[in-house]
Image (tube, rainbow, N blue to C red):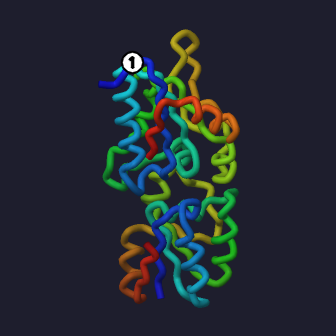
Amino acid sequence: MAEKGKKVMVTVRKAPHGSIYVQESIEVMFIFATYEMDLSVVFLDDGVLALQAGQDTKDLGIKGFMASLGALVDWEVTKVYVDRQSLKDRGIPEDAIIAIGKDDDSGAPIRPTVLDSAEVAAMMTEQHSIVSF
Amino acid sequence: MLHTVNKSPFQNSALENCLRLARDGDVILLLEDGVYAAAVGTVKSSLIEQAVRRHAVYAIEADLKARGLDKLIKQVHIASYGDFVDLVEKHPVHAWL
């Protein structure tokens, strides 16, 4: 049984629609949140492509998971981070990434927090376990 | 010959390997995660920016839309699944998986 409050991290390093990895990572985020673990999520390398705005999977005949990503905060997945260098390498402006929820009071969009590689690395060393996708 | 690339250019070297062996006049088709190579302003954009001088380069529209890509290298042709079929009919195919 998962121990409450243990620090766990989910890392997402795959591009969103070419494989099932990102979809699976979201399932795992929701499970960890349900067990009230101290969850951090980091999007890095090709994982940041999942945060690109304007994704529409209709013509691929799949539902996609943009709605799930947009509701992470509602599921109490609030510590969500994205690696600055990975965004830069892929030409994605930091202010153009999708929102993962809305602030309860102001209604302002909440976006993943952009971090430098050293900050991501430091956070990794604090975890009890890291689950990678 | 028609070369198809379905892997992200940031993840492995499939596109680079393809472009190294493709001969002048060969056609390149980007699909699935391969379409990320058609985006402007990335660390890998120069691959396709150079490739369009030697090749007709296509990218599948449904894959572009699924990934939210709308700022593309301008010489890249946007292809429907029907166009894909036409290309496969016309050329022998080498899939760089």
Q: Is residue A33 above or below residue B43?
A: above
Q: Chain of mark 1?
A: A
Q: Is residue B35 above or below residue B26?
A: above
Residue at the location (54% across, 48% down)?
A49
Is A11 situated left or right of A89 in this image?
left
Q: Position of residue B37 (x, y in %)?
A: 58, 64
Report the front residue among B67 and A14.
A14
SS at mark 1 in the image: loop
Report the front residue among A70 and A117.
A117
Q: In the rendered image, which quarter contains the C terminus of chain B?
A: bottom left
Q: Position of residue A17 (x, y in %)?
A: 42, 52
Residue at the location (37% across, 21% down)?
A3
Residue at the location (44% across, 62% down)?
B32
Total marks shown come to 1
Q: Is residue A93 above or below residue B49?
A: above
Q: Residue furthest top?
A: A105
Disc 1: which residue: A4
Residue at the location (62% across, 30% down)?
A113
Q: Residues within 10 Å of mark 1 (few under 14, many from 20)?
A: few
Is A27 situated left or right of B53 in this image?
left
Give the amino acid type for the residue marked by disc 1 in the picture.
Lys
Which image quarter: residue B73?
A: bottom right
Q: Position of residue A33 (x, y in %)?
A: 39, 24
Q: Is residue A59 above or below residue A132?
A: below
Q: Residue furthest left?
A: A1
Q: Position of residue B14 (x, y in %)?
A: 52, 72
Report the front residue among A7 and A109.
A7
Which image quarter: residue A1?
A: top left
